[in-house]
Image (cartoon, helix red, strand yellow):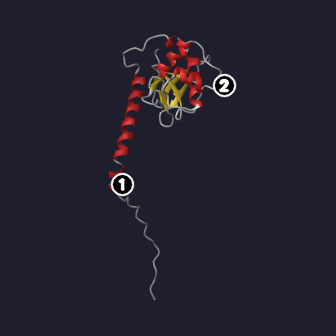
Amino acid sequence: MNLRGIVAVSGRPGLFKLVGQNKVGYILEGLDAQKTKVVANITNTKLASLEDITVYGEDEEIKLADIFAKISAKGSTPDLKGDLRAYFLEVAPGHDQEKVYASDMKKIITWYNLLKDLPLFTEETPETPGTPAEVKLSEEKAASDKKQKATGSKASASAKATTKTSAPAKKASMTSKKGV
């Protein structure tokens, strides 16, 4: 299953294929029937690659591709309005039932229903790093993860290193007072 280049965008429904990148942001193409192209701004939009998404597990995290493979082997998906917990226990055994919400399960099943008919779903994941935009997205994610870990450990050190910034000098008053 090749999920490389397929992303979920914060604040937008559905899934998108990462087409390229320009100065402003990432160029995305919708996976729905309309194939609309969208530019997602780099500064205020978060992209999550389906290849990197995992589900909380009791022992270890479960990859989304593994869950999709089990859903595919099962053959059918349940109605999204019903209780999904029993179905999800079958396709993702060992998931953390306290951390994985019903909305997460609905989202995963909806994503599966979008992807199952695409040719990407049946091909193998290539060993090549991908398009330049995909490589940059994965590098940015790794850098942000590294930055979050680094800021957590340096929080006490940075508290001591803060310095005061000086305020701009006040403008001198041009009026003079004559003494008595």
Q: Quadrant of residue 38?
A: top right
- The amino acid sitting under disc 2 is Gly
Q: Nearer the viewer, residue 81 or 19?
A: 81
Answer above or below: position of 41 versus 132: below
Asked if residue 153 is positioned above or below residue 6 in the image, the reply reads below
The residue wearing badge 1 is: 159
Position in image of residue 71 (x %, y %): 54, 17
Judging depth in this view, the residue of 27 and 87 nearest the camera is: 87
Identify which residue, 167 or 153, lies in the foreground: 153
Give the distance between the C-alpha atoms of the residues marked 2 and 1, in whole angstroms.
Answer: 50 Å
Q: Is residue 88 left or right of residue 147?
A: right
Is any part of residue 100 visible from this angle?
yes
At x 37%, y 45%, the residue is 152
* Numbered badge on residue 34: none
Foreground label between 2 and 1:
2
Q: How many other residues sit within 10 Å of disc 1, few (<14), some (14-19) or many (≥20)?
A: few
What is the number of callouts on the image? Answer: 2
Question: Which numbered marker is on residue 82?
Answer: 2
Mark 1: which amino acid?
Ala
Among numbered discs 2 and 1, the one appearing first in the sequence: 2
